[in-house]
């Protein structure tokens, strides 16, 4: 790990009442004296002038000093709290660089905190997740992870694995005891409890992953079936222009809404049809690109006419993996009531929702169905998780299931059983950083903002 002094602006770009510059390194008291002419008392706010090389005040503000190891990074840390104008902040940062600091890389403060044992990798990632949280639920879950709930759950799983591995290793040392020893020590019961606890953590992490990424929902269909009206209804705002003229929407319109704390990224697309209009054709091509990237597509059709040949042509082009909901819109004109039912056709099974985007009838049915597709169920103790966490948990579960199959076979292979348990523990260790490669650390922290 680099031991040099780093500095960065820790507040968001732009104007503000207060701006903060963070500095981390070793033996920073001489640095503080050169900058302010004062030696700050640890963990006390010191009013000071921040001085240029000529001794002229660049700004007046608060100086905070956190000595190692009792700081965010585990090193000496200085915080300069000055006026939040961008010019002032850049002048102060330039002065820090003149005094020997270098500009921090993205996420370098959090990386130093991780490498100095101030937090594990899951907690470090929760710092960035808390900053990026798009909903209240996501923010609360990120705080749980930052406070160590996720890490403690992983630690409990690791402890169960270690205890089980100890039993297996002891059996390998005394082969004459063999499988009877494991039965007497309730190794199989321990394995079952471990799997149950892992499934619980996997569920909580999966819900947290959902809070972070949400669901990408694309509104598709022929022109003038009410896609823009549905977007406006879901968002509660007139984001899209609605007219009786087919082809009004020429480009994709995006908006993010929340349902039960889950962010839904809703994309309204151009009507899908054959056209000679060059601009509209470009919009239709972009519509298909959005459909390829979607998690769910809502195929809107007119409730008065039902699924037409043109709609079936659209269905035939949809990716096979894509979840879809057929939305029968304009039930207010068709004289129908809101309803949900399963639909079976040549293009696979789907759910159908009858609603009125203009009047709002049936919208709640659609919201509930989207939550169901996302796999959401209400939980109070969700912690934020990333895709790599989910993959690591899934890999650990796979190794534990393999271990169970090995030991429950006709000829139990205890060496393989022990190896699968070791690999499961290694997979869990990647979540908290115990077995994480340096190149992966570089990727993770490079996505943080500068100043964190």
Image (cartoon, rainbow, N blue to C red):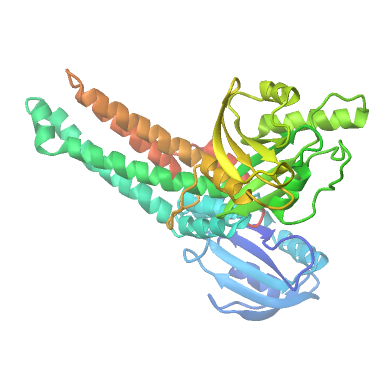
Residue 226 in view here: yes
Identify the residue at the far front of this view.
335
Q: x, y percentage for residue 77?
A: 57, 65
Q: x, y percentage for residue 449?
A: 66, 52
Closer to the camera, 383 or 224? 224
Q: Quadrant of the C terminus?
A: bottom right
Identify the residue at the far top of this view.
411
Horizontally, residue 329 falls left or right of residue 238, namely left
Residue under the image location 79 percent in, 51 percent down? 239
Q: x, y percentage for residue 140?
A: 52, 60
Closer to the camera, 366 or 130? 366
Closer to the camera, 126 or 242? 242
Q: x, y percentage for residue 368?
A: 55, 47
Horizontally, residue 330 falls left or right of residue 375, namely right
Residue under the image location 28 percent in, 41 percent down? 194
| Count of numbered circles on the image | 0
């Amino acid at each position: 790990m680099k031991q040099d002094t780093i500095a960065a602006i820790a507040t968001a770009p732009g104007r503000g009442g207060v701006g903060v510059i963070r500095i981390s390194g070793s033996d920073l008291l001489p640095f503080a004296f050169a900058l302010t002419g004062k030696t700050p008392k640890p963990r006390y706010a010191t009013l000071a002038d921040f001085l240029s090389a000529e001794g002229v005040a660049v700004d007046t503000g608060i100086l905070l000093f956190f000595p190692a190891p009792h700081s965010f990074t585990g090193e000496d840390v200085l915080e300069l709290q000055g006026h939040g104008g961008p010019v002032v902040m850049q002048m102060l940062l330039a002065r820090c660089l003149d005094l020997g600091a270098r500009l921090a890389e993205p996420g370098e403060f959090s990386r130093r905190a991780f490498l100095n044992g101030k937090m594990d990798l899951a907690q470090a990632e929760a710092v960035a997740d808390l900053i990026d949280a798009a909903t209240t639920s996501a923010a609360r879950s990120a705080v749980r992870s930052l406070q160590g709930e996720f890490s403690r759950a992983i630690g409990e799983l690791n402890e169960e694995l270690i205890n089980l591995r100890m039993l297996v290793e002891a059996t390998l040392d005394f082969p004459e005891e063999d499988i009877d020893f494991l039965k007497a020590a309730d190794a199989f019961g321990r394995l079952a409890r471990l799997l149950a606890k892992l499934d619980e953590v996997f569920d909580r992490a999966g819900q947290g992953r959902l809070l972070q990424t949400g669901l990408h929902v694309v509104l598709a269909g022929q022109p003038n079936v009410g896609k823009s009206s549905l977007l406006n209804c879901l968002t509660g705002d007139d984001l899209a222009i609605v007219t009786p003229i087919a082809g009004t929407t020429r480009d994709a319109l995006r908006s993010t809404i929340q349902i039960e704390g889950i962010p839904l990224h809703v994309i309204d697309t151009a009507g899908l049809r054959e056209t000679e209009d060059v601009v509209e054709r470009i919009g239709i091509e972009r519509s298909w690109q959005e459909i390829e990237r979607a998690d769910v597509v809502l195929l809107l059709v007119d409730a008065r006419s039902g699924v037409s040949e043109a709609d079936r042509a659209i269905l035939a082009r949809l990716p096979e993996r894509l979840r879809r909901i057929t939305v029968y819109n304009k039930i207010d004109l068709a004289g129908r009531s809101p309803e949900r039912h399963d639909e079976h056709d040549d293009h696979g099974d789907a759910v159908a929702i009858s609603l009125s985007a203009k009047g709002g009838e049936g919208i709640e049915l659609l919201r509930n169905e989207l939550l169901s597709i996302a796999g959401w169920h209400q939980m109070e103790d969700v912690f934020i998780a990333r895709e790599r966490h989910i993959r690591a948990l899934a890999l650990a579960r796979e190794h534990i299931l393999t271990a169970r199959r090995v030991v429950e076979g006709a000829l139990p292979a205890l060496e393989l059983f022990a190896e699968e348990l070791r690999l499961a523990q290694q997979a869990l260790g990647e979540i908290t950083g115990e077995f994480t490669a340096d190149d992966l650390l570089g990727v993770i922290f490079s996505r943080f903002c500068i100043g964190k």
